[in-house]
Amino acid sequence: MTSEYTVQGHPISELAERFGTPLYLYDGDVLRDVYLSLRERLDPRVDILYSAKANPNVSVCAVLRSLGAGIEVSSLVELVTARRAGAAPEDVIFLGPGKSAEELRACVDQGVHAIVCESFDELEQVNDLRVPGGARVMLRVNPSFESKGARLAMGGKPRQFGMDQDVLLRSRSFLKSLRHVEIIGVHGYMGTRILDAEDVVHNTRGILAAAEELSVELAFDLRTVDVGGGLGVPYFENEKDLDVDLLAAGVNSAVAGFLDRQGDCRVITELGRYLVGWCGTYVVRARYVKESMGEWFVVADGGTNHHMAAVGIGSFVKRNFPVRSLTRYAEPAFRPYNITGPLCTPNDVVAKQVALPEVHAGDLIGVERSGAYGPTASPGLFLGHGFPAEVLVLDGTPHLVRRRDTVEDLLGKQELIPT
């Protein structure tokens, strides 16, 4: 009887042998369960959009799209990804504080539901496109109210995101001067990694109230409101799971009252980390196990170059993601280990003093809850190691959804000059 980790019946040793390591392994069952669990609890009038930035793999996007999610994008590549994943234009919004002229034009050409404008200059850029009937935009508001619960605040304080609510309230004449812009609603996003349901409800109510005030004062019809999201995944010790039942009850109550007043206004919540974080495991293989000055180190074939989030997501104090031995998954802890990667820097530490079964060279180690902000939020080109493979197990079948970088992938764009 083996004690190793399995995904939908596939032993981790077989997956690692077939696809190599390091790799990101996504469990499609978990991906679906998280989405559907939230979907069945939320008011059906609340549309869920997946924030592609959390994990822009086209196959991950396609699974969520097949379940009914729209997609929120923040670059031209993400827009193309959403369309290739099967998202209809009316279920795509584009946001970001520094969109290029090419990106704005692509939004118009593709017919996305809305461009989320984050500055008055951007509104003028959209207006200059001279779209017949007006390009559909939403105003990203940096609300006046104090947000709650976000580990990384995105609004409610000086930020490059959005336009301050009090400034927007004084912009009626400017907005009316934009002849080729159609304002259809308001977007608000207060922050990320929120683990208290009451904080999510507080932020939702605040954004809905701000949207209603802005629509009245600026005289536009409120057809869409994006209340953000920011639902968190507990990574660290003493963090608790988000109470989804409490969250849904509060959000549904806020939305119901809002829609009683606003009729058929579309309400959107955009979620990234929460939808995909749970399904992913970063899998590395131990190359060497050694002792140094009384501490034990596992030097693995992948590290922070693929999983920068594991260094603590902006924390001043290093905290560990959940880390497990995948080879000896059911065995008891033997001693604490520092899990490091192959990089020539002392900062390449994925986990410190994490208790594991005895580790031997060749063992597989997994960093759990790693489906969000993995490869694309990491310095994958450092030291030329490149990006890892990504594998999605869907309906019992493992699929390679991104091949690992090769030497030619990394060198092919460089130009050698004569010397």
Image: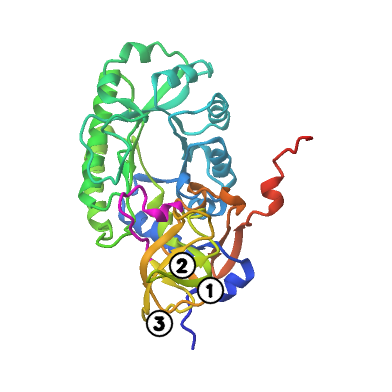
Q: Which residue is mark 3?
A: 331
- The CA span between labels 3 and 1 is 15 Å
Q: Residue at x 21, y 40 (%)?
A: 257
Query: Is 290 above or below relative to 199?
Result: below
Which dot, 3 or 1, sits closer to the camera? 3
Mark closer to the chain start, 1 or 2: 1
Mark seen at residue 87: none
- Crowding around mark 2 (Cα neighbors within 10 Å: few <14, some 14 to 19, many 20+) is many
Left or right: where does residue 315 sit relative to residue 58? left
Give me the residue at 33% from left, 21% from top: 220
Q: Nearer the viewer, residue 21 or 33?
A: 21
Answer above or below: position of 35 versus 287: above
Q: Is residue 15 magenta?
A: no
Circle 1 — which element?
A: helix
- Total numbered circles: 3
Q: Amino acid at mark 1?
A: Ile
- Front residue of 24/225: it is 24
Q: Which residues are magenta?
A: 308-322
* Disc sitting over residue 12 in the figure: 1
The residue under label 2 is which amino acid type?
Gly
Mark nearer the N terminus (3 vs 2): 3
Left or right: 71 as drawn, with respect to 246: right
Disc on res. 366: 2
**Camera sees residue 370:** no
Q: Amino acid at mark 3?
A: Glu
| Labelled pair 1, 2 in contact (Cβ < 8 Å) | yes
Give residue 87's position: percent from left, percent from top.
53, 44
Q: Position of residue 147 (x, y in %)?
A: 23, 39
Relative vertical location of residue 298 with respect to residue 126 in this rendering, above or below: below
Label 2: element kind: strand
Measured as percent of width and height from the top left, residue 345 is found at: 49, 53
For the residues labelled 1 and 2, the Cα–Cα distance comes to: 10 Å
